[in-house]
Structure formats: structure tokens, C-alpha cells
Image: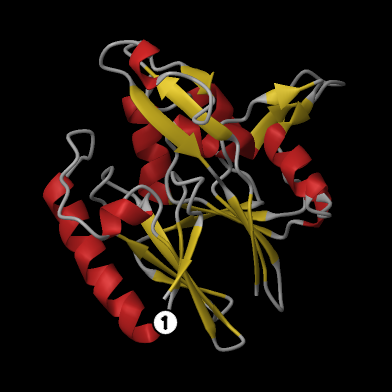
Amino acid sequence: MTIIPLSEGAFTVGKLKKFIPFDIDKDNLQQREIGSLLVEVQPFAVITSEDILVIDSGLGFENNGVLQIHQNLLNAGIDPSKVSKVLMSHLHKDHSGGLSKINSSTGLRQLSFPNATYYIQKKELEYAFEKGFPSYVTEDLECLKDNEKVILLDGDGTINGYIKYELTGAHCPYHQVFWIVDGGEKIFFGGDVAPQLQQMKSRFIAKYDFDGKKCMELRKQWWQQGQEEKWSFLFYHDIKTPIFSS
């Protein structure tokens, strides 16, 4: 399998939940808004023997009408129209902004990967509309409803026999994670339950998680199992260490 990090960069996020670009090599951390978080954003493309996968879809920022995730794919030599599956861990706006875009001709919002099948937990979609802003931007998600390109999952299962998904909750109530097994390799994507390498190595409870203790326990379990089974870990919020191979 080929793993391609699609880094969108680092951002500061304050009380208004706006993502403000931040250069971690040049900008001064002390000049951030008091109480703000430094958030790194990094979807992934994974090329398997069967598919071109995108895992989570980034912030949805555009430059000259081109989605950043599309440009990142093009820069890696991948035509976005060739993406065949989009796997969504959850629908918080920093993970789901790039899954749809406005059609410049019709003015309507449509899926940004038109030839892909999207895989989303059914209850996560329902919860997104129940909870709403600021964690979820529901206008970005409206086109997921009753869409033949969207498969709504219920709990745990497998996709095409080689992608396993598991409903974990923990970061948000209906968060899911993925294992991709192909050609003797195993890739693990833990979304926001396992967002950074350093969190895998420490007993850390985040206040922003729905169930921080469960997140910590799952990270410990996955880290141990991944070491034993030689997983490749993908970290969505760690642009300096996007991939860690055991």
C-alpha cells in the first residue's frame, strides 16, 4: 500500500472556533490568542490493490476555487475523480469540510469526490444535525442525506473484506476508526481518539473529548497491539510525524 499524507498545515483555534493559519516553524506560540489550541490538520490518501482511499477530508479551504485537499491530491499525482472510497472517522468541521463543495455552475453543494462512495456512521450524521454549530457545519453535510453515494454504517463491520471499521465513541459519541489490511500490511487510522504520536506514548486525558478516559485507554490498547502486529499508524493531527510504522 502507498500512504500519502495530505497536510493542510497548522492552525490556532480560539473561542470563536475559527481556524487561523499558523506556521509552526516561524510564528511565535506566545502570540496566540489566550486559551487557543494549536491544531494540525492532515487527511490521508491510501492506494491499495483495489482502491484509492481518502481518509477524512480536511477543512474544506479553497484557493482560486480549488479545494486544498484536491490540490494536495493533484500535487501527489492523483486525480480526485479517481478516488473510489472516502472513509470518515466523524464529522467535526476540521475533518469534514472537504467532503463537499459548491458547484460554481449550479450554486448547489455537492460531494467533492463524485465517483467515490462515502462511509459514515449513521448515528454520527444524525448527531451532527442535532448538535450543530460550532462543532458541526450542517450546511456542508446536507448533501450526505439520502445520497446514493453515501453508505450509512451501523456499529462495527468490514468494507470489501479488507477495511475494518469500529465504532469507538470516546472523542465524540459516534466516532469510528479504521484498519486497512492489504498485501500483508496493516494500516490503522484512529481519527481523533488517536490523533498524535506523542499521545500514544503517554497517559493523557483531553478535556475536549466526550470520554477522555476511554480515549486514553483505547490509545494504550492500540499502541500495544500495533507494536505486536506491526501496524502503520496514521495521525491526523500530527504533521511532523504523519506515519509511524511499528
Residue at 59%, 53% in the rendered image: 44
Residue 158 on image: x %, y %: 47, 74
Q: Amino acid at mark 1?
A: Lys
Image quarter where the C terminus lies is bottom left
| Res. 172 image quadrant | top left
Q: Is 189 situated left or right of 182 in this image?
A: left
| Rendered image coloring scheme | secondary structure
Residue at 60%, 36% in the rendered image: 8
Q: Which one is nearer the viewer's eye here, 108 or 193?
A: 193
Residue 70 on image: x %, y %: 75, 40
Q: Which one is nearer the viewer's eye here, 218 or 90?
A: 218
Residue 123 on image: x %, y %: 36, 47
| Res. 39 image quadrant | top left
Residue bearing the label numbered 1: 230
Q: Is 194 situated left or right of 162 in this image?
A: left
The local crowd at label 1, few if under 14, some if 14 to 19, many if 20 or more residues have their Cα within 10 Å, is: some
Residue 31 on image: x %, y %: 38, 11
Residue at 12%, 50% in the rendered image: 213
